Image (cartoon, rainbow, N blue to C red):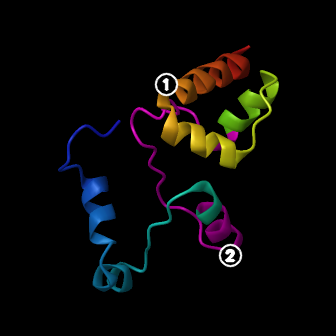
Amino acid sequence: MITSPHNDNLTQVRKLAGRKWRDKLGEFVAEGEDLIAAAEAAGWPASMRLVAAGSGLEGMSYSQFMHGLREAGIELDRKVLADIAVRDPETFRRFAEKAREAVAA
């Protein structure tokens, strides 16, 4: 877990906001599972994945999260989940916990 704003990974992400650094390093930042999936489909694998603290997904990938939801019998599409994550983070954390429990069972 990243706890410092001076963390090397965060510094790298901030640098990539500028075109100069993207061109120099040959890297870019893709936010969201759709953009990451599109980049990987185009042959650009992710070199690093960061998940926001407090999202409830710490220690669990997005695919594990979705699999856990299906195993728990929770049928919500990703757009509804994204809306819940923004509007009601506590409910989203409860969904993440249910998914984690279903994957562990």
Over which residues does the magenta segment extend? 36-63
Horizontal and vertical percent for residue 32?
Answer: 55, 57
Circle 2 SS class: loop
Horizontal and vertical percent for residue 105?
Answer: 74, 13
Residue at image x 48%, y 52%?
49
Query: Looking at this view, is 73 or 101 the one in front?
Result: 73
- Residue projecting furthest to the top: 105
Q: Of callouts 1 and 2, which one flags the residue occurring earlier in the amino acid sequence?
A: 2
Residue at image x 25%, y 37%?
3
Image height check: is 93 above or below 4? above
Q: Is residue 77 left or right of residue 29?
A: right
On-image quarter of the N terminus: top left
Identify the residue under disc 2.
42
Horizontal and vertical percent for residue 38?
Answer: 67, 68
Residue at image x 62%, y 70%?
39
Q: Amino acid at mark 1?
A: Glu
Q: Are dots 1 and 2 in contact, CB under 8 Å?
A: no
Query: Looking at this view, is 52 or 86 the one in front?
Result: 86
- Chief secondary structure of the magenta portion: loop
Q: Amino acid at mark 2?
A: Ala
Q: In the rendered structure, find residue 90 and report the number of the disc placed on it.
A: 1
Q: Is residue 37 left or right of residue 32?
A: right
- Residue projecting furthest to the front: 87
Residue at image x 41%, y 32%?
54
Image height check: is 88 above or below 35? above
Q: Is residue 52 left or right of residue 76?
A: left
In this rendering, which labeled residue sits more in front, label 1 or label 2?
Answer: 1
Q: Where on the picture, by quarter, is residue 66?
A: top right
